[in-house]
Amino acid sequence: MICCKECLDLLADYLDGELDEKTNASLEEHFKDCPPCISFFNTYKSTTRLCRETLKETEIPDIVRIKLQEFLKENTRKKN
């Protein structure tokens, strides 16, 4: 059974449909028994959708885009 922390770690992959069948089923089972996690998931899903829609409608200046990419690359390297 998946615990709440594992649930939170899997949300992005769950939304993107990237979990294997067993993990997906375990996560959905956890949601049935954990109202706080399903509430958080619904908020996360809405926030993700709103961010994607906003980014599609808003043009990001090149300098901001470049700085953001540099920041993400640097911080991703630190974690790996």
Image (tube, rainbow, N blue to C red):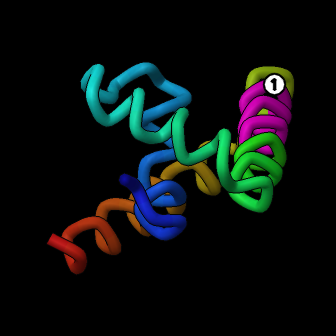
- Label 1, residues with CA under 10 Å away: few <14, some 14-19, many ≥20: few
Q: Could you tell me which secondary element the residue under label 1 belongs to? A: helix
Residue at the image point whose x is 43% and y is 20% from the top: 17
Q: Is residue 49 visible?
A: yes
Q: Which residues are magenta?
A: 45-54
Residue 74 vs 2, above or below: the answer is below
Does the magenta portion include 13? Answer: no
Name the residue rendered at 31%, 61% in the picture: 73
**Residue nearer the viewer, 61 or 30:** 30
Picture quarter containing residue 13? top left
Quadrant of residue 46 within the rendered picture = top right
Query: Which residue appears at 31% of the width and 35% of the height?
Result: 23
- Spot occupied by residue 5 in the image (x, y as percentages of width and height): 48, 69
On the picture, is 12 further left or further right than 51?
Answer: left
Q: Give the quadrant of residue 77.
A: bottom left
Q: Is residue 47 magenta?
A: yes
Majority secondary structure of magenta residues: helix
**As shown in the figure, which amino acid type bears the numbered disc 1?**
Glu
Q: Position of residue 58 (x, y in %)?
A: 84, 31
Name of the residue lying farthest toward the bottom: 78
For residue 59, say whether it is visible: no
Question: In x, y percent, where is residue 55?
Answer: 75, 32
Q: Disc 1 marks which residue?
A: 53
Q: Nearer the viewer, residue 61 or 50?
A: 50
